[in-house]
Every structure is written in C-alpha cells, then in structure tokens.
Amino acid sequence: MIKPEDLKQQVLLKEINDAGLQKIASMAKQVSIKKGEPLFKEKEDTRGLWLIHSGKIEISRVTADGWRQTLVVLPAGHFFGELSILENRKHVASAVALEDTELFLIPKEDFEKLISEDCALALNIIKQMAIVMSKNLRRMNDKFLSALISY
C-alpha cells in the first residue's frame, strides 16, 4: 500500500492535507519499471496521472522525419500524463524509464470520480497542475527567446 507521507513528497500533492493524501493513497497504484522500459507510447490510451516516486522518466515524441525528440526528463517528485487526462485524449508523447523507476498511478477513472465526489480536493490538485504547467511554459518561453536573441 502507498503511504500518504510518500505522496507528500510529490510536487503535485505537497499542499494536500492528510485526509486528502489518505484518499489519494487508497486509489493510487504502485508501478515499477526497469531502465529502458516504455511506460506508454504515442497514440495509446491514457491509464491515468503518473507520479514519480523514484527514478527518472523521459517524455519524447517522434518527429515528422522519424527522429525521436526528447521533450523533458522528469525526476522523482514530478508528474506527467495530466494533459491526456484533462483533455480526455490519447497520449501525444511516449514515456520511457531512464533508470529503474517507482511510480504511483492515479487511474483515470478514479481521478474522474474524485472530480465528481470531492471537488475541493480535485481543485487543489488541478490548481497545482496549473501552477507547475505555468512555470514550465514560462521557462520554455525564456529558452525560446534566448535562442532567438542569440541567433
């Protein structure tokens, strides 16, 4: 069973109270994957929201000319799969373990049930998602502008 204190280490759940962490712990599944093992591929159905307990995950896409492009490498404490859940669509990228990795999966169905049954908890999680995604977007914009200026 997943311990609520392990969930507290997740950037997505750091603001969640003990009761909320307990609720998430009861629905989350622990998943272990080995280095080099794919978790999901582009165009596959989403299984849910992934939280990295230990290890690293690479998110990548295949470009139009067939090259694999790394989008981001995520360390322990981070999350992914949120866009597929929020937009209710298939994955547009692939996820592969860069080292042996322990993950927590909040299944899509359980997350959707949480939204309808505990709006306050779901709102806290979605708010934290928005904050992290906003920071990521600002960081990408800064890199893009720096590359344009130096070009």
Image (cartoon, rainbow, N blue to C red):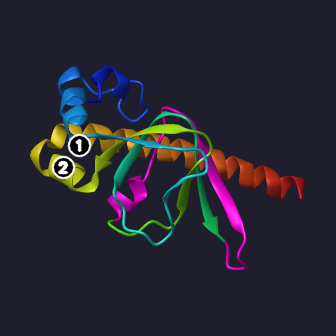
Q: The C terminus is located in which quarter?
A: bottom right
Magenta segment: 63-87
The tag on residue 122 is 1
Residue 143 forms part of the magenta stretch: no
Across and down, in percent, residue 121 comes to 21, 37
Q: Are marks 1 and 2 in contact (CB under 8 Å)?
A: yes
Residue 78 forms part of the magenta stretch: yes
Across and down, in percent, residue 126 comes to 32, 45
Find the distance from the CA under tag 1 to the CA under tag 2.
5 Å
SS label for mark 2: helix
In the rendered image, which quarter is residue 108 located in? Answer: bottom left
Closer to us: 13 or 123: 13
Across and down, in percent, residue 107 comes to 27, 51
Amino acid type of the residue that numbered disc 1 sits on in the rendered structure? Ala
SS label for mark 1: helix
Is any atom of residue 14 visible in this view?
no
Find disc 2 in the rendering and name its residue.
115
Q: Residue at x 65, y 50 (%)?
A: 140
Is any atom of residue 139 visible in this view?
yes
Q: The N terminus is located in which quarter?
A: top left
In the rendered image, which quarter is residue 87 located in? Answer: bottom left
Closer to us: 124 or 27: 27
Amino acid type of the residue that numbered disc 2 sits on in the rendered structure? Ile
Q: Is residue 61 left or right of residue 147?
A: left
Across and down, in percent, residue 4 comes to 28, 24
The tag on residue 74 is none
141 versus 18 height, above or below: below
Q: Residue at x 51, y 38 (%)?
A: 101
